[in-house]
Amino acid sequence: MTATDRVLVFDIDPGRAASIVAILERSLPSVAEGAIRAHLDLKSQGYGTSLGVQAIQGGQAALIVVVEDPTFASLAETAKQSGVASLLVVNGADAPATLAGRVRGFNDWVALEAVERELMARVDGLLERQKRGSSHLPSIDPRFLALVIHDLRTPLNVIGLTIRAISQTVPQRSAELDEDLTFLTDNARQIEKMLAQLGDYCRLIEGESKVSAVEFDPRRFLADFLEERRGRPGADPTPVRLELAETSPAEVALDPQRARLALQHALANASVAAGPVPVKLRSRGEPGRWIIEMVVDKPPPATIGPMELRPDRFERLAGSAAERRGLDLAIAARVSEMFGGSARLEVDPGRCTTIVLDWPDRLREA
């Protein structure tokens, strides 16, 4: 372990959890305070602990150590989705075949009776493999991705034309065929939207065009942005209410095109989460900062917690864990990063979720 590694221990037994934390802390006396933390409070079956799951999903851990318990069954999958290594402490001795089923989904395991002598070696091995793997991830040239996106549009257009041809040439359609055609049309539109998002993301990470600074009035900028959004064909039906605080800056100097791109994608994500509920688009200022908030006034999913948004994490506010993969918030985070600012989620459990874009009011020279 190094001083920067963060480890979360999940155990329903406080005494046992404390002893495992002590073993980990002994291996690195200079470990930062709170870097090794135990989670005991269960929220509900299948979710482990609310704060623990939020810490995993928020990128606040390099590894989790789970002491076997049925309530923690989903933690290995949660860790896997978040790129976090996982180790299971098996409580009890079983035949190899039975044990194999119990440890499935975890990166490694150790028997409870062997924790004192084996835990640190297992943890160090997992962390080392994780770092080695992340340093050798293949990089993809954004220009190559742009070509793939372009080529994918041709078969997608063919699918769309075929659907329209069937609709026009088969006037007497059954309800089942109509349902199938609607399903295909919706999916084709979703793929088209994903390709557009990926194209935007590729242009941002390519970094060939310089970020420019143009002075503009944020109040007029936001009003025009919403007016344009309402006037687009097939516009998002989710209503948006603009709220300008007294502190909202009268002038900023940023790249308006990229600011519009970040707003467009962040608001798209908030709209999916809000559904028919209006999204509040708030603008306020702090010394040297322009802060934009998109508030979804409905209880967020139980597994959504506050987190810093990063360009390499594709998370969404709506849907199940399997459906919450997307580029919207990654694009907003990338633009914020280019501005020298940040993007984050703020969560009020049971009430609302807020996407926050925190930008300087003037573009700083790199």
Image (tube, helix red, strand yellow):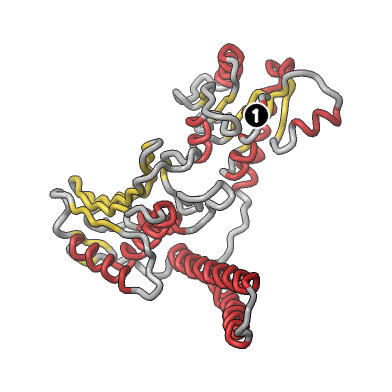
> Toward which corner of the image does residue 129 lie, by quadrant?
top right
- The percent coordinates of residue 96 (x first, y second) are 85, 28
Q: Residue at horizontal 59%, vertical 75%?
A: 152
Point out the image quarter for the N terminus.
top right
Residue 311 located left or right of residue 101: left
Which amino acid, mark 1? Val
Is residue 297 visible from the viewing direction of this image? yes
Q: Is residue 353 placed above or below 152 in the rendered structure? A: above
> Toward which corner of the image does residue 16 lie, by quadrant?
top right
Q: Residue at horizontal 20%, vertical 60%?
A: 218
Between residues 30 and 204, which one lies in front from this camera angle?
Answer: 204
- The percent coordinates of residue 7 (x first, y second) are 55, 29
- The percent coordinates of residue 313 (x first, y second) are 50, 50
Between residues 167 and 252, which one lies in front from this camera angle?
Answer: 167
> Toward which corner of the image does residue 222 lie, by quadrant?
bottom left
The residue at which mark 1 appears reads as 123
Between residues 330 and 350, which one lies in front from this camera angle?
Answer: 350
Q: Residue at horizontal 55%, vertical 22%?
A: 28
Point out the image quarter for the C terminus.
bottom left
Q: Residue at horizontal 80%, vertical 28%?
A: 99
Q: Is residue 343 placed above or below 55 in the rendered structure? A: below
Q: Is residue 165 placed above or below 180 in the rendered structure? A: below
- The percent coordinates of residue 46 (x first, y second) are 60, 33
Q: Residues within 10 Å of mark 1 (few under 14, many from 20)?
A: many
**Dot 1 lies on which element?**
helix
